[in-house]
Image (tube, rainbow, N blue to C red):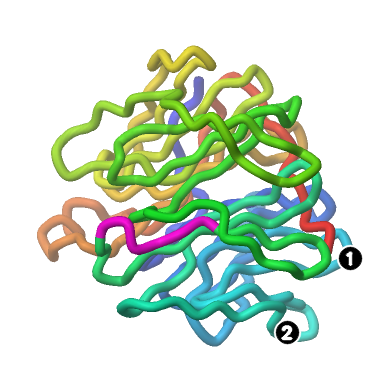
Amino acid sequence: MSDVEVVLDAHAELGEGPLWDPEAGRLLWVDILAGAVHTLDPATGEDEVFDVGGPVGVVRRRAAGGLVAATEHGFAALDPEAGTVRPLAALERPGGPWRFNDGACDPQGRFWAGTLAYDLSPEAASLYRLDADGTVARVLDSVTISNGIAWTKDGGTAFYIDSPMLRVDAFDFDPDRGWLSNRRTAVSVDVPAGAMPDGLTLDAEGGLWVALYGGGAVRRYTPAGTLETEIAVPATNVTACAFGGEDLATLFITTARQELSDDQLAAEPHAGAVFAVRPGVTGLPAHEYAG
């Protein structure tokens, strides 16, 4: 296994949502609170920025071209080349201020994304699904900080993280209806005080890679839920990870500067950077939005 390297010293406030674009050979990622969608060339360090005009939790490629995004309060189609943001669905919900957070597409091309309350009120958030026809369904309620979601290679199981629960849950997945059932704990994530699991991705062998926010690491758990590998990252707030590169053998890792004191930032000059490591396994191609 190679060492973790800085790919882009971005100083992102809340870097998140890495996604490999195989056609462009670039890494997409977002700085959520800055409302910025980044397109990074890992070979050169060139990083293009598209301003969405407000917080953006996650983006995914659209089969029709461009991107689909979970913005602050809804879903939108993005065309960074044309510089356009086209709303697809706006959501309203009671309670205090909230926004969308992490998400992904399922094997059938539906876009899933969850929310959080800005004050992190317990069980005030939800997980939503945007279907190809633009219909939005609320799939899970009583969520606190909706984070990583991913599907097994055969599409029969979905894994999901609600961060304060300190675990990865597994669901049986109905591909026809796009529904989750039989919730159970797949991984109990034992972390230091103040840390929690954040983003999630799977490798081609079925291993679960979990970013530890506040824990300065990415971990690989076996399909049976056993901790196998921990990769230290020189940034406390590790937010997400995704496999990329032509061979899908590079694990790209996003981090954040938010919630760090001046002393912590001085001790962590690369907080908010995008990192990379080759962990010795390959990933799975990311699914696109079919709408």
Q: Amino acid at mark 1?
A: Ala
Query: Residue beneath label 2, please?
Result: 86
Q: Is residue 106 above or below residue 114?
A: above
Query: Residue beneath label 1, please?
Result: 64
Q: Is 10 placed left or right of 223 in the picture?
A: left
* Helix, strand or loop status at disc 1: loop
Camera-side residue: 90 or 118?
90
Q: Is residue 104 above or below residue 33?
A: above
Q: Is residue 127 above or below residue 166?
A: below
Camera-side residue: 41 or 29?
29
**Residue drawn at x 64%, y 73% as measured from the top left:** 75
**Residue drawn at x 65%, y 54% as measured from the top left:** 27
Residue 157 appears at what percent x and percent y? 63, 29
- Residue 35 in view, yes or no: no
**Residue drawn at x 69%, y 59% as measured from the top left:** 60
**Residue drawn at x 26%, y 57% as measured from the top left:** 122
Q: Quadrant of residue 191?
A: top left
Image: magenta residue range: 122-127
Toward the right, the furthest residue is 64
Residue 203 appears at what percent x and percent y? 62, 27
Q: Is 122 placed left or right of 245 in the picture?
A: left
Residue 227 appears at what percent x and percent y? 38, 16
Q: Earlier in the sequence, mark 2 or mark 1?
A: 1
Verify whether residue 58 appears in magenta. no
Which mark is on residue 145?
Answer: none
Separation of marks 2 and 1 at Cα, in angstroms? 14 Å
User: How many numbered tags mark residues here?
Assistant: 2
Tag 2 near tag 1, CB within 8 Å: no
Give the quadrant of the C terminus: bottom right
